Image (cartoon, rainbow, N blue to C red):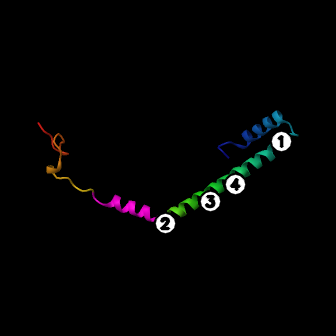
Amino acid sequence: MFGLGMWEVLIILFIVLLLFGAKRLPEIGGSLGKGIREFKGSLTDVQEELKEIGAGDAQPTARQAEADSRRDEDPPLRDAAEEEPGEEAQGTERT
């Protein structure tokens, strides 16, 4: 249990009992339980939304498929004759 021994846990529980009193401990426990339940519920809601979003992305639209096919094509090469004066070809240096 978090690397704590039995005596450490008992001491912590005793200090909590002294700080809050016996009457408030059930209230604190109940509110902690509610908070944990709400947190878990929120996590499951977010996970379900992510699954829905992920399932929607599995089927690309026509526009996405067209963009993917354009990305896969090689870009057209330019000839040195097509360069404008003042432009240097990539990979070559003028000295």
Residue toward you, 14 or 86: 86
Question: Is 63 left or right of 78, judged from the image as shown?
Answer: right
Q: Is disc 1 in contact with disc 3, using a CB cutoff of under 8 Å?
A: no
Q: Check disc 2: other Cα within 10 Å, few if <14, some if 14-19, many if 20+.
A: few
- Answer with the quarter of the image where residue 94 lies: top left
The amino acid beneath tag 2 is Gln
Which residue corresponds to mark 2? 59
The answer to which of 63 and 44 lies nearer the viewer is 63
The residue that mark 4 highlights is 41
Circle 4: element type: helix
Residue 39: give x, y in percent of width and height: 69, 50
Q: Is residue 88 left or right of residue 64?
A: left
Mark positioned earlier in the residue sequence (4 or 3): 4
- Label drawn at residue 25: 1
Q: Distance from label 1 to label 2 (Cα)?
A: 52 Å
**Closer to the observer: label 3 or label 2?**
2
Residue 85 location, x and y as percent?
Answer: 16, 42
Determine whether the residue tagged by mark 2 lies in a helix, strand or loop: loop
Q: Earlier in the sequence, mark 1 or mark 4?
A: 1
Q: Nearer the viewer, mark 2 or mark 4?
A: 2
Q: Are marks 2 and 4 in contact (CB under 8 Å)?
A: no
Q: Nearer the viewer, mark 1 or mark 2?
A: 2
